Image (tube, grey):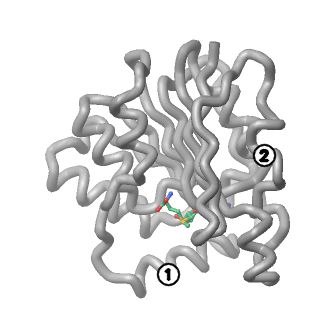
Amino acid sequence: MGAGDLSTHPDRMRWNAKYEAAGEPRFAPHPLVDWALVADVPTGPVLDLACGPSGSALRLAAEGRAVTAIDVSEVALRLLQDEARRRGVDGLVTTVQADLSSWRPSPTEKYAIVLCTGFWYEQVFLRAIEAVRPSGLVLWEAFTAEARRRRPSLPAEWCLAEDEPAALLPDNFSVLLQQDLPDQGKRRFVARAE
Ligand SMILES: C[S@@+](CC[C@H](N)C(=O)[O-])C[C@H]1O[C@@H](n2cnc3c(N)ncnc32)[C@H](O)[C@@H]1O
């Protein structure tokens, strides 16, 4: 598999199969989006990483935000595009098929909101925060080490350590929310760039 060739990428194949088997998605926005909608967020576009068939992208597009939605699964991206067209927001939703482990943010394109839910790799987080514009928000939710204690098959690199993501932030970010959801083994997190 060469760089950029996703034909045999294991994440792509696994998630395509999941989305094909799952039937019509619910397109429910993530609760962090409600949080962002009442926060003071600058104008500007949204980046939704590991978006899936993202109700969050659709909700933010309905608010008039341009959304770039990235995922390795073209099945998820097609579901999202089709629903965006049904809702009349397809002009605001751009889908990009990419493997986030080799993704790099554009040095010039900055986002008012960078959102990622249900996915964690430290390197992806570190690159994602480079894409946040001044006063913009990074919103994240991922599994914690607690989830791994319950499901030892979860790879460690998919799980937040005790002090993450806060400990990975540079000084120009302040943490607005860090909430553990012990029953789900997840942590929600919001930070603002200076
Ligand atoms: C648990 S789902 C989360 C989807 C959505 N963000 C949500 O909260 O419902 C994880 C998503 O990550 C995507 N994904 C997995 N590995 C990936 C990779 N290496 N690069 C890009 N996306 C990936 C999957 O296709 C899937 O849509």
Q: Amino acid at mark 1?
A: Lys
As drawn, is 123 to the left or to the right of 177? right
Identify which residue, 182 or 147, lies in the foreground.
182
Q: Position of residue 123 (x, y in %)?
A: 80, 45
Q: Nearer the viewer, mark 1 or mark 2?
A: 2
Image disc number at residue 69: none
Quadrant showing the C terminus: top right
Residue drawn at (33%, 64%), measured in percent from left and top?
A: 79
As drawn, is 154 to the left or to the right of 110? right
Image disc number at residue 164: 2
Q: What element does badge 1 sit on?
A: helix
> Does residue 167 lie above or below 123 as drawn?
above
> Does residue 78 lie above or below 122 as drawn?
below
Residue drawn at (79%, 65%), measured in percent from left and top?
A: 145
The residue identified by callout 1 is: 18
Q: Amino acid at mark 2?
A: Glu
Local packing at callout 2 (Cα closer than 10 Å; few below 14, some 14-19, many 20+) is: some
Local packing at callout 1 (Cα closer than 10 Å; few below 14, some 14-19, many 20+) is: some
Q: Position of residue 51 (x, y in %)?
A: 48, 54
